[in-house]
Amino acid sequence: MHDVTDENRDIVDRVLGYARARLLTEDTPLDKPQSPAELSRLAGPTITEQGIGGARALSIFEHILAPACITTEDPRYLSFIPSAPSKAAAAFDVVVSASALYGGSWLEGAGAVHAENEVLRWLATEFGLPAGAGGVFVQGGTLGNLSALVAARETARENGREAGRPAPDRWRVVCSAEAHSSIASAARVMDVEVVAVPVDDDGVLRGPAVDEALERHGDSVFAVVATGGTTNFGIVDDLAAIGEAAARHGVWFHVDGAYGLSAMLSPDARPRFSGVERADSLVVDPHKWLFAPFDACALLYRDPELGRRAHTQHAAYLDTLTEAGDWSPSDFAAHLTRRPRGMPLWFSLATYGAAAYREAITESLALAQRIAQIIAERPGFSLVRPPQLSVVVFERDGWEKADYSAWSARLLDQQTAFVTPSAHHGRPNARFAILNPRTSIDDLTMILDTMTAKEPR
């Protein structure tokens, strides 16, 4: 790499100029994917021995690659769980990279870790965890859930050894049959068994069903997982009763709140999460409903020392870190090298204040209730289930899976909206995931209007 000052200055100016324009643009196209063949044709070879130059590379990104990526912050991006980072958070993400910050250890990144920890302490307080609670920002809910469950199993192993109990033939984790796919993924990685407990008709996992599973499987259960807002419906399990059941059996209680737990910031939704304060660990993803850029999941432990014991890596070159006893984020999850991904959220919170977050989340909750009522009253439409949080699931009467798929494809092709089909108990449906503060009731009703006539497939 040649340090050519003029060349580097030109590259930085071009990139930052593009970033500034992109951050300040309010009407960015929704955009859509292209086929591999088409992208290869348009972009051509970009990795060469001599390089194509910063100007050409940025032009290819701006005019070919970026338009082939759906804009997740678009107010009509209503699929999966959208991301709508605040301008402050997105802009500061540039600063984090530009500052060459490392967030794995206190020694190397004390200032960044301090700021991240302030956010984590704020979240722990919001969720009712004790003063000593803490954790780390990881890539996403999948890694957060995995790391929490590893800590839970290691704690169960230690407790079993101290009590003189033999290790079970097979470790088990109890969760809802509606739990996020990341729980099953973590179980595969850990080579443990998932005990999927049926939910009630309203989709909620409740204490008696968990109690029964814990009685049946005894000491082989190392953790109970409850969901604080399912991805498909936004349903919150009975956290209080499940937490009580876990406590009675001496089992680790984990709350997967990747999407929904942020709703606790709103007084309208806070009562739904009663019992989360019992959690031994929990996750919430700021890149979902806390308006941070990808990728950031906050993993919190009631007793961070249990996370540290499970995850600290030991090597000769790491001794200078592990022997110091400092708060090093690498010690609290299944990772080592990490960027300080909590910093954009810190900057945004410090800039706008927590009240702005509460207001934005409250508005999303209200918008979900409003469009749900419109759907329930609109002829030819059926609400699958009243929304608890900000996910609204509905059916167009008479439509089959192919109808939803064709409709969804037309919406994206025409750059109207991004709404992918979903399903429940084998029945296809449509789903609005409302997290973006810029999404309006007019956006949602306009999308409904596109479903009023059944077009040819």
Image: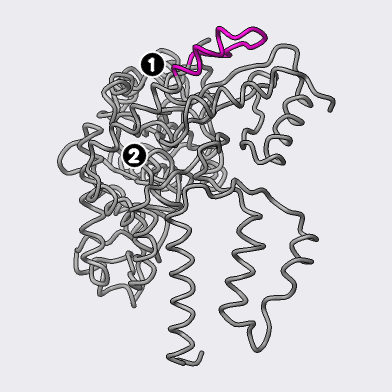
Q: Who is closer to the viewer here, 251 or 376?
A: 376
- How many numbered marks are there? 2
25, 101: nearer the viewer: 25
Magenta region includes residue 247: no
Q: Is residue 378 magenta?
A: yes
Q: Which mark is residue 160?
A: 2
Q: Is residue 89 above or below residue 388?
A: below
Q: Which mark is residue 207?
A: 1
Q: Is residue 200 visible?
A: no
**What amino acid is found at the position of numbered circle 1 in the picture?**
Gly
Sequence-wise, which precedes: disc 2 or disc 1? 2
Location of residue 102 with respect to 317 vertically, above or below: above
Instruction: Label 1, secondary structure: give it.
Output: helix
**Residue range of the region highlighted in magenta in the rendering:** 369-386
User: On the rendered structure, is 229 left or right of 318?
Assistant: right
What element does badge 2 sit on?
A: helix
Q: Indicate left or right for 257 with 51 as reference.
A: left
Q: From the top left corner, tell me how far across and down residue 403 is, in percent.
A: 77, 24
The residue most toward the right is: 456
Q: Quarter of the image for the C terminus: give it.
A: top right
Q: Residues within 10 Å of mark 1 (few under 14, many from 20)?
A: some
Give the vertical position of 191 relative to 64 (above or below). above
**Residue 7 % position (x, y):** 49, 87
Distance of label 2 from label 1 (alpha carbons): 24 Å
Residue 88 placement (x, y as % from top left): 33, 53
What colour-coding does the image apply? one colour
The residue sitting at 44% across, 77% down in the picture is 12
Q: Residue at x 42, y 55 (%)?
A: 24
